[in-house]
Amino acid sequence: MRAAERRAGHALLLCLLLGGAACERNAALQSPNAPGTPDSPTPPAAPLNLTGNWTGSLTDNGTVKNDATLRLTHTNNNVTGTISWTGPTTAMGTVSGTVSGGTFSFRIVIPVGGFTSPPSTRFCLASLTGLAVDVSAEQINADYTGTNTCSGLVPFPGALRVARN
């Protein structure tokens, strides 16, 4: 019989002689998460990754709501991809930005020809800059401002609200 097996047998015999309460107390003292001992440290959260497809809405000028789709790739702190939206206005452009912690700073560019509806916007160029704080792996809620070569400054902050598909 090995020494470890003998010690286990002796501990069991001692518990039987002294009563179950002594064994329970001894087991609690040896438990790694016993009362009075610190719990195991919580593992760090996985880094935020925005890669994927996102859908939701893009509301411009506080009133014009469009359905939005983003396709993003997130490498290190950099995010790139495409955005399209349909509704009263239809457009397609690019997204670029950076993630730091739970904050996503981005720029959306709709090039000339990127607006397809209404027809009067075909020759417009738009540049929007936005900031989303408290971004999660499932949701991006951002406000943006910008300019449009056809209409000038975006008069009210716009809102981008999307969720991961």
Image: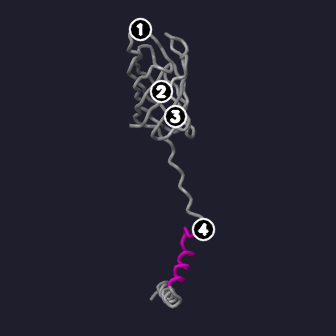
Identify residue type, mark 1: Ser
Tell me how far mark 1 sits from mark 2, CA to CA. Answer: 23 Å
Q: What kind of secondary structure does the magenta stretch mostly adopt?
A: helix
Tag 2 residue: 95
Tag 4 residue: 37
Tell me how far mark 3 sits from mark 4, CA to CA. Answer: 42 Å
Tag 3 residue: 78
Tell me how far mark 4 sits from mark 1, CA to CA. Answer: 70 Å
Tag of residue 79: none
Tag nearer the camera, 2 or 4: 4
Q: Position of residue 133 (x, y in %)?
A: 56, 35
For the question of whether residue 46 can be seen, the reply is yes
Tag nearer the camera, 3 or 2: 2
Tell me how far mark 2 sits from mark 4, CA to CA. Answer: 49 Å
SS for tag 3?
A: strand
**Do the residues bearing badges 3 and 4 touch, measured as CB atoms within 8 Å?**
no
Q: Where is residue 68 in the image (x, y as percent from the top left)?
A: 41, 27
Q: Position of residue 117 (x, y in %)?
A: 38, 14
**Residue 21 lies within the magenta run:** yes
Magenta region: 20-37
The furthest residue to the top: 120
The furthest residue to the right: 36
SS for tag 4?
A: loop
The furthest residue to the front: 63
Identify residue type, mark 4: Thr
Tag of residue 120: 1
